[in-house]
Amino acid sequence: MGSVTGVLVLAGTPIGDVADAPPRLLTELAAADVIAAEDTRRLRRLTQALGVTPTGRVVSYFEGNEVGRTPELVEALLGGARVLLVTDAGMPSVSDPGYRLVAAAVAADLKVTAVPGPSAVLTALALSGLPVDRFTFEGFLPRKTGDRARQLASVAAEPRTMVFFEAPHRIAEALAAMAEAFGPERPAAVCRELTKTYEEVKRGPLGDLAAWAAEGVRGEITVVVAGAPPAAPKELGPAELARLVAVREEAGERRKEAIAAVAAELSLPKREVFDAVVAAKSAAGGGAG
């Protein structure tokens, strides 16, 4: 790889199995002028496992110091350095340090690129057996009971599959809170230790998963929850049915066609819609036509 200066590189790291490290990660670790790591000790273990010897300066960049260290890293970027940002596992800035540095680099009109790597979010989603065509990432839930309940209530009607991160010592109460907010029958999957030796995916209704977790769960955990089922069709009275037919008539449809269209749209017998139109016309002093 040729030397590229003044670039921030976000690099995904293995979430479990070191063999999942992308080849470009090894190249970037060896070539970076500065490596900003969430935990420098874990970075050392990773580079030893990969057989890579970094030549650049290694600094810590974690939740406790990222506000103060971000300007320092931006200065390095402005000076032409290639800065590599890595976290303990997965992609930087996804529930990990990184967002502040990316935002600052973008504001300074600096180039930001990435080395794609393993993702606990996508891995758990794929293994869950739940719909994957549309999903949301909700990150970690609040630790306080009231805040957690309010956040879960705010997404109780979310139709897309939801992905959460949770700590092992809070997973039992988190699943119980989800069962309370979403209903005990809502399908879900608890994915723990993904890509590691003791990988496990436990699938079932939230109520059952909460009872299972009460016995204790270890490891890194990602929870995938099915979205809310479609709301039951609203039952419309005769006046509303007649109004829907009238709207179509005003748009140029013949009454028979309008009645058939409204009936099909609402999965109702055509006779029910016809009777509603008759009733409305009778109430208005006219005929059904």
Image (cartoon, rainbow, N blue to C red):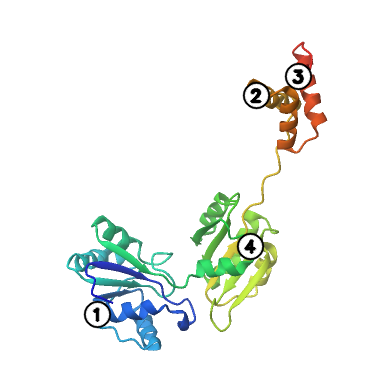
Q: Earlier in the sequence, mark 1 or mark 2?
A: 1
**Residue assigned mark 3:** 280
Q: Earlier in the sequence, mark 4 or mark 1?
A: 1
Q: Position of residue 67 (x, y in %)?
A: 29, 63
Dot 4 crowding, Cα within 10 Å, few <14, some 14–19, many 20+: many
**Residue assigned mark 2:** 247
Q: Earlier in the sequence, mark 4 or mark 2?
A: 4
| SS at mark 4 in the image | loop
Q: Nearer the viewer, residue 243 or 180?
A: 243
Q: Earlier in the sequence, mark 3 or mark 1?
A: 1
Q: Is 225 placed left or right of 273 in the picture? A: left
**Residue assigned mark 1:** 56
Decide if residue 173 is in sight here. yes
Decide if residue 63 is in sight here. no
Amino acid at pointer 1: Gly
Dot 1 crowding, Cα within 10 Å, few <14, some 14–19, many 20+: some
**Residue assigned mark 4:** 130
Amino acid at pointer 4: Leu
Question: Does 224 appear above or below 21?
Answer: above
Callout 3–callout 4 Cβ contact below 8 Å: no
